[in-house]
Amino acid sequence: MGTGTQRLYESAPYLKQFNASVLSCQADGAGRFAAVLDRTAFYPEGGGQPGDTGLLGGVRVLDTREKDGEIRHLLAAPLEKGAWVTGVLDWRRRFSNMQRHTAEHILSGLARRLYGAENVGFHMGREATTMDFSVPLSAEETARLELLANRAAAQDLPVEILYPAREELAGFAYRSKKEIAGQVRLVRIGEVDLCACCGVHAARTGEVGLIKIVSAQRYKGGVRIGMLCGEQALDDYRRKQEENAKISALLSAKPGELAAAAERLKEENRSLRLQYDGLLLASLRRKAASAGRSGPVLVCFEDGLSPDLCRQYCLMLLEAHGGTAAAFSPGADGRMNYALASADADLRELSKRMNAALAGRGGGKPGLVQGSLEAGREEIEAFFSALPA
């Protein structure tokens, strides 16, 4: 049942402080207390927009939510029923949400008009605001959408709230994700957008500031766009500029030439890697040739080998000495990588026994098995020493 709480945020979204009476306050079972007021400027979570935070009677408001028509202020401590309290919004957070919600309207209205894309999902995350559109958009279309959104913001268009009578609704071509019973609240931004919405918005598009699309990825047959605006976009640009300056210094390249410098560095690294791999393989081949057998299995240890190089080293040992060879190399995860190879023996049973004895895992073909062990050199050498000659 609703309590008839007066929703001050609907008519006065810029109200930062207000007084109200506490109608009830009860523990919510999650270590918080849910207070219901006779009037509130705190917006409850809904429509993709987070609930407001701030102070209520000096007590921290952790979140604001609506359940069964009742606006609940989730508090860190209880308030006395009937108390007359002052509410103070966390205004910077609230105004950022107003900017982001308004920017979402601008982008959604333009996406529908330009590309027939319907907004089917909207979420204000901590890092970015995401919007899910029903059709895919190319990089060029996304760039055009961003440009026109910023032009609409720069026009400083009024953001109007309309409450048309039910019989008038047919004359409004508005966006809505669902059928709405009762009074419909419309948000109109010039010729850019007309949408049924219960959220709070900036009074004019100029207050949104810069609108920047920071990501776009395919999602459920359409596209999910990540967007920043206002101070969020400015902070993101500042951080990226600082990172670019650091990278510029590291690469000794001008900011506008970083991609070319990174490409050169990548090519140099590839060339050096090929040289290193060639030298490493030559070194391993020499070591394989000089290895000495001390039992039925030639067992060799070598540091710093990847699983693939460990396999190659084992095959080199087999090529140089025949019989059965085993190569081991400590891995970065603390386990011991291994490879066993033989020209004429089926090694799968030996691999199973070794895995069971030395907490290993792995397998392969009869003549070549690979894996890793939770064992050190001494344990491995002891295992092979115990094998029958």
Image (spheres, rainbow, N blue to C red):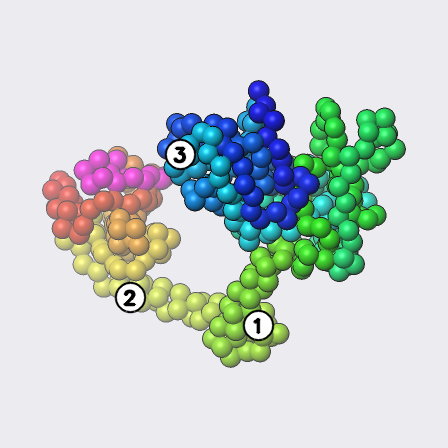
Give left or right: position of 19 versus 336: right
Mark 1 closeness class: few <14, some 14–19, many ≥20 residues within 10 Å: some
Type of amino acid at the residue the image marks with label 2:
Arg
Depth check, front residue: 8 or 53? 8
Mark 3 closeness class: few <14, some 14–19, many ≥20 residues within 10 Å: some
Asked if one can make out residue 199 in the rendered structure from this viewpoint, the answer is no
336 is higher (above) or lower (below) than 187: below
Residue 347 horizontal/vertical position (percent):
28, 39
First to last magenta residue range: 351-365
Check disc 1 and report its element: helix, strand or loop.
helix
Give left or right: position of 104 versus 343: right
Residue 311 horizontal/vertical position (percent):
34, 52
Mark 2 closeness class: few <14, some 14–19, many ≥20 residues within 10 Å: some
Residue holding disc 1: 258
Quarter residue 76 falls in: top left
Taking the magenta stretch, the answer to whether it contains residue 354 is: yes
3 or 1: mark nearer the eye = 3
Numbered badge on residue 286: 2
Q: Distance between the residues labelled 3 and 1?
A: 56 Å
Depth check, front residue: 65 or 273? 65
Taking the magenta stretch, the answer to whether it contains residue 384 is: no
1 or 2: mark nearer the eye = 1
Residue 253 horizontal/vertical position (percent):
55, 78
The quadrant of the rendering that contains the C terminus is top left
Residue holding disc 3: 78
Nearer-N-terminus badge (3/1): 3
Q: Distance between the residues labelled 1 and 2?
A: 42 Å
Nearer-N-terminus badge (1/2): 1
Depth check, front residue: 21 or 145? 21
